Image (cartoon, coloured by chain):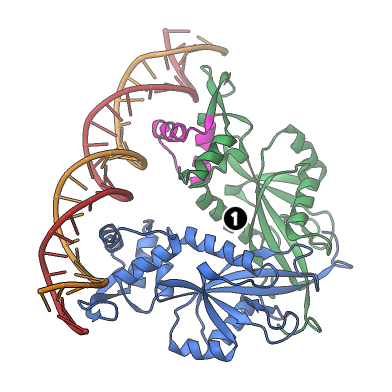
Chain colours: A blue, B green, C orange, D red
Amino acid sequence: MNSYQEKDKFYVAVDCIIFGFEDGKLKLLVFNRKINPFKDSLSLIGSFVKIGESVSDASKRILEEFTGLRNVYMKELKTYSSVDRDPGYRCISVAQYALIRIHKSIKKIVEQNEAQWFEVQELPALILDHNQMTTDALRRIEELARYRPIGFELLPEKFTIPQLQALYEAIYRRTLDPRNFRKKILSFDVIIKLDEKDKTSSKKGAFLYKFDRDKYQKLQESGYNFEI
Amino acid sequence: MNSYQEKDKFYVAVDCIIFGFEDGKLKLLVFNRKINPFKDSLSLIGSFVKIGESVSDASKRILEEFTGLRNVYMKELKTYSSVDRDPGYRCISVAQYALIRIHKSIKKIVEQNEAQWFEVQELPALILDHNQMTTDALRRIEELARYRPIGFELLPEKFTIPQLQALYEAIYRRTLDPRNFRKKILSFDVIIKLDEKDKTSSKKGAFLYKFDRDKYQKLQESGYNFEI
DNA sequence: TCAAAAGTGTTCTCAATACACCCATGA
DNA sequence: TCATGGGTGTATTGAGAACACTTTTGA
């Protein structure tokens, strides 16, 4: 690292691995490309980074463009930089994974952008190394879910305990015991029981809860471990 | 992402956060810059990425240059891309953290390169955002150490249990009970007791052990959790 | 009245923690 | 012989895992 003169320069891209949860399934937002390169192929949602923005600025920009959402849970996964990863140009991509709540307002914007949701268990072929990015991101959120309450990012503000359990079952790809799950999640004392019931999935109805961010903050500060 | 025409290009750098363990202390390898920019300042070991190499190629290249080592434990931390992170030029840096064994052969190369080891508890000011990178890396290895056997990357091939304990105490910045530590580490059945003793730190001497990579592999495949 | 999901408690096992003394040896 | 660090065992506590029945209600 001696001088900035005559050093190589790179195109830098971001690709967003956007997860949602719907009908008990973990889903990925995929973009149907209408322009070249890779016209008519499926890809993650991405963009080149502009000189006047950071990588995270760029990912927020395109996330808003494709979903209308701001202030989304989004973290860097890693960079993909193989020399031959993009046969067209030498381009380094920084992959970001995001967790969002799927609701109606998003669905319209998603459609307008020719994007669509796929179940992560049934993904189609994506361009370049995007399938690899998705696999890596899935592994990451599986790890992360064990000790961070990321599940709440994917559920509506109000959710039932069986819904939360179904989400964790989708992430871990295994079934959990409902008694133990309920006992454990309640023991953290970070979800608040509401007076309403959700009756969409049973006649009896299940009580709705909401996540208490303040209590979670305090739990974290106290050094306690959220682990499901 | 419509066309590669007229997109911005960036300098891309790697910066290596290289940790070692010596005299019971966790240490960071720091480079005393002899050339501009930032002549006579301290920095992490870094380089620009070349067009014909990946980010990880670049980090391996400079790690070998500064330590003579190959096949080192090295992982990506994250990218640093603020618009104003380097006042000289618009440059994105991908930080990598590495864990190495400090022994004599390295020390010579390190000196030749005007690099030196600092205890992580007593770090000097480094250029740009390099102190931030180091802080982030320390947090990462503290997390990682809980469920991955990264400790063995920092110790010599043959080590004693008290040495291993001292390393974990340095990473976690707290003391551990020697009976419980020994019991736990032995329960994983991934270290092999040798017939030799190390007498450098006591008259009685402590038995040397070595890490059994094969057994660790099997442990991992069986889904078991290494957690200290 | 019955099908389908929600909700509830107890027992057992095992791992984490706390804690104090003897051992071996070179100086 | 003594100072120094190495090495050992037990009791207690708490969390995780396994497991089956009752409740509610709309169709």
Q: Residue at x 58, y 38 (%)?
A: B152
> In the rendered image, which quarter is residue A89 located in?
bottom right
Residue B128 showing in the rendered view: no
Camera-nearest residue between B180 and C9: C9
User: The disc numbered 1 marks a residue on which chain?
Assistant: B
Magenta residue span: B163-191
- Check the picture and name the quadrant holding the N terminus of chain B: bottom right
Q: In the visual, does B12 lie left or right of A2? A: left
Residue B221, image x and y in percent? 52, 44
Vertical arrangement, residue A125 with respect to residue B40, above or below: below
Vertical arrangement, residue B217 with respect to residue A218, above or below: above
Q: In the visual, does B151 lie left or right of A159? A: right
Vertical arrangement, residue A116 with respect to residue B122, above or below: below
Residue B143, image x and y in percent? 50, 52
Q: Residue at x 54, y 35 (%)?
A: B215
Vertical arrangement, residue C17 with respect to residue A99, above or below: above
Camera-nearest residue between B159 and B190: B190
Residue A78, image x and y in percent? 63, 63
Residue A210, image x and y in percent? 31, 75
Task: Say what amino acid the circle numbered 1 marks.
Answer: Ala
According to the picture, the residue beneath numbered tag 1 turns out to be B137
Residue B6 inside the magenta-drawn segment: no
Mark 1 is surrounded, within 10 Å at the Cα level, by few (under 14), some (14 to 19) or many (20 or more) other residues, namely many
Element class at badge 1: helix
